[in-house]
Image (spheres, helix red, strand yellow):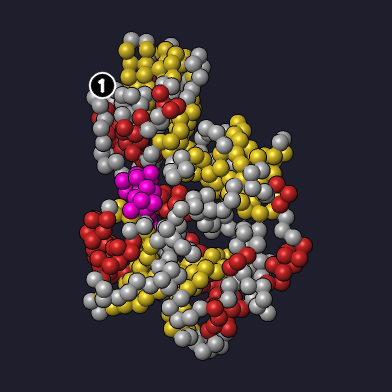
Amino acid sequence: MVDFGGWSMPVQYTGILDEHHAVRDNLGVFDISHMGQFFVEGATAAAWLNGLLTNNVDRLSVGECQYTLLLNDQGGVIDDLIVYRIGDARYLLVVNASKIDEDYAWIQAHLADGVKLENRSDEFAGLAVQGPRSAQLFDAFFQGKYSRPARNEILAIEIDGECYYIARTGYTGEDGFEVFCPASRAVKSWGDILRKGAEFGIKPCGLGARDTLRLEMCYPLNGNDLAADTTPLEAGLSIFVDLQKPEFIGRESLAQQKQAGVKRRLVPFKMTGASPPPRSHYAVYKGDQKIAETTSGTLSPTLKIGIGMAYIPTEFARINEQIDIEIRGKRFPAAIEKKPLHRTGTASA
Amino acid sequence: MNVPENLQYAPTHEWLRLDGAEGTVGITDHAQAELTDVVYVELPKVGAQVTAGQQICVVESVKAASDIYSPISGTVTAANDALSSNPALINTDPYGEGWIFQIKVEAGEEIEVLKSPGQYREQIGGSGGSGEGV
């Protein structure tokens, strides 16, 4: 067990590799109760959210969601999150555990009249069912009573009189569902999912596999790959930034950065030979020059080689560029790759 | 957790099997379980002289890199090359095929600071739970 954003969470249940392969091949379930849930409501909620977040919530129909970012005035990342439109003028924001307090304080400080904000993180548990057999499990569960939400859609249903949100989202690159339910229902739902999922080879999965799965997809982890001094343009997330919007916090800085051109880019790399697994904060070299530090790294269980990400100066941030990663004083060769590193996931964006 | 009776243990979770002046060293079952899947072992150099408690090599799991400390002073006489191609031996057979290095012991006195199986069991709480890790 490790501390993660104030939560005591398992790194693994049966083993990181075992759990990783379960998600890539069949099915895994993650306890994501640590994640935060904010509810936003009001006739002007959409316009207000558009002034707060980088993506454009006007693109969402009721029941749809989008990945988006909360920035500081300099265009740096406070948090990355998913905003779900759960009613005409009602939104659910799912934020990172370690950022709940900071996000809430920031959003509260920028609150507009007529918009109601509620932090209901403590009331909700979250379970993420991920893997190519997720749809089969959904059907086994509901027996046709509900139709599956499509990718990036959310369904609100009642089970035993309690409200459940079921979204077709995830952090693994595989098809899957993220379920948010009252905390009092967490243990029962966890058990139900494991029982029903048994015939599909489901395994309980911990933070270790969550990290290897997301890194193979090059999904950023806030605090590692995103920070208050990195912008979404540098992080390669510009498709989630709508600079056409007249105003949002951080917009000015991003527009200037876009104009000037970004000086560094977050890119994935793959070790080109046998090496210890790369980790975060390892030095990255081009020739004899230190050009960056890794922000994430691991052994990829799918590719069976070391992988990672780093903010590389733009002049070197090209596919197939050869770099070296310094591990305990020795340098090991690596090459910059295209995103994602794992290309056959079952999640269709 | 398996804690064999015929071994001695360092508080940093290495085991030592002594056969006269020849020692064999690995990490405990508890340690391998805490580390999770071992994916890389940086072996010590044969001929290296170490003192008890000195960092001698590194074992890496998917989760993290962990320093391994020599439980005793001496000269490294062999390293388990099988771990280079199959580091998971540390997980599957920590007290057998997963041994890490052999050492020629120079002075017997440090052995007194090592733990008996009972003392080591007490240290890890018999649970295999989180503990201090390795």
Q: Is residue A139 left or right of residue B53?
A: left
Which residue shows up at 25% across the image and 21% down it? B6
- Whether the magenta-drawn stretch holds residue B7 is answered as no
Specify the subunit that label 1 lies on: B
Q: Is residue A254 above or below residue B89?
A: below
Identify the magenta region: A7-26
Q: Is residue A133 left or right of residue A266?
A: left
Which residue shows up at 30% across the image and 66% down it? A138
Q: Is residue A111 above or below residue B85?
A: below
In the displayed orientation, state which residue is furthest to the right: A260
Would you identify the image quadrant in which residue A173 lies?
bottom left
Say what secondary structure mark 1 lies in: loop
Task: Using the rendered image of the protein, determine whether residue A101 is visible from the camera's viewpoint.
Answer: no
Q: Position of residue A280 (x, y in %)?
A: 55, 46
For this rendering, which residue is in front, A16 or A176?
A: A176
Packing grade of label 1 (10 A; few <14, some 14-19, many >=20) is: few
Which residue shows up at 48% across the image and 67% down it? A95
Would you identify the image quadrant in which residue B11 lies?
top left
For this rendering, which residue is in front, A72 or A274?
A: A274
Q: Is residue A27 above or below residue A147?
A: above
**Amino acid at the residue labelled 1:** Asn
Q: Position of residue B97 (x, y in %)?
A: 33, 24
Q: Position of residue A27 (x, y in %)?
A: 33, 55
- Whether the magenta-drawn stretch holds residue A23 is answered as yes
Q: Is residue A191 left or right of residue A309?
A: left
How many marks can you see? 1
Which residue shows up at 51% across the image and 78% down it? A60
Task: Using the rendered image of the protein, determine whether residue A27 is visible from the camera's viewpoint.
Answer: yes
For this rendering, which residue is in front, A27 or B63?
A: A27
Q: Position of residue B127 (x, y in %)?
A: 26, 42
Q: Which residue is mark 1?
A: B6
